Image (spheres, rainbow, N blue to C red):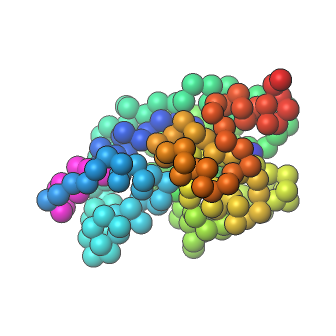
Amino acid sequence: MLFDVDGTLIDTADLIADALEETCRRHLGQTHSREHYYSLIGKPALVQMELLGGPERARAMLETAVALYEDGAHRERLFPEALDTLAQLREVGIRVGLVTSKLRRELNPTLERIPLQRYAQVIVTSDMTTRPKPYPDPVYLALQTLELPAEHVVFIGDSPYDLQSGRAAGVRTAAATWGPHPRPTLEAESPDLMANSFRDLLRYCGLRS
């Protein structure tokens, strides 16, 4: 099972949105609606900055946004049952991977605070492939590393970009409905499972009745 990180395992939506809002205020002198920031969650940070401020400002905005996120990193919160679910999957021999749109330098501080790597046999960040999500490349890399065929894998994510990436790579997809993206947005991607809780994921694997 492959998991997205932000919005799927860790509740960071408001932290990310606040960082994006303050970045826009400092660099552009304007802000957007909360919903607009939420809609960008799941895209790589540099892509977010290009969409918000254009390519010429993106690099400078990225540095600001990353610093603002770290300033507020104490607000990172694991979703309830996230670690228990990862532990149960590993206990029964199901291999676990993380496939995130974060850069590795963004993810590393998070992993120092929250030990997700304890359960993951592969971690793919957006700078490890030429094309990040929603392209299939990150999922392909995880499959190659785990030496698993696509039909044996499920990718769980809270954004349409996760579901698009998984579908394009030929794996099954599960939409985590507890993230910031509206349920209709996720349903439009026709995932194999609409998961309302981590228990739904375990049931999907046959681990709970």
Residue pictured at 54% horizontal, 44% vertical: 183
Q: Pinpoint residue 15: horizontal percent, then vertical percent.
A: 36, 40
Q: Is residue 152 visible?
A: yes
State the quadrant of the C terminus. top right
| Magenta portion: prevailing SS class | helix
Q: Which of the 4 quarters of the picture holds residue 29?
A: bottom left
State the quadrant of the N terminus. top right
Q: Nearer the viewer, residue 197 or 95?
A: 197
Q: Is residue 152 left or right of residue 30?
A: right
Q: Pinpoint residue 110: horizontal percent, then vertical percent.
A: 48, 41
Q: Pinpoint residue 203: horizontal percent, then vertical percent.
A: 79, 31
Q: Nearer the viewer, residue 116 or 101?
A: 101
Q: Nearer the viewer, residue 167 or 103?
A: 167
Q: Is residue 152 left or right of residue 21?
A: right
| Residue lying farthest to the left in this orientation | 29
Q: Is residue 62 magenta?
A: no
Residue pictured at 37% horizontal, 31% vertical: 74
Q: Which residues lie in the magenta part? A: 20-28
Q: Which of the 4 quarters of the picture holds residue 116?
A: top right
Q: Pinpoint residue 142: horizontal percent, then vertical percent.
A: 71, 58
Q: Is residue 150 left or right of residue 189?
A: right
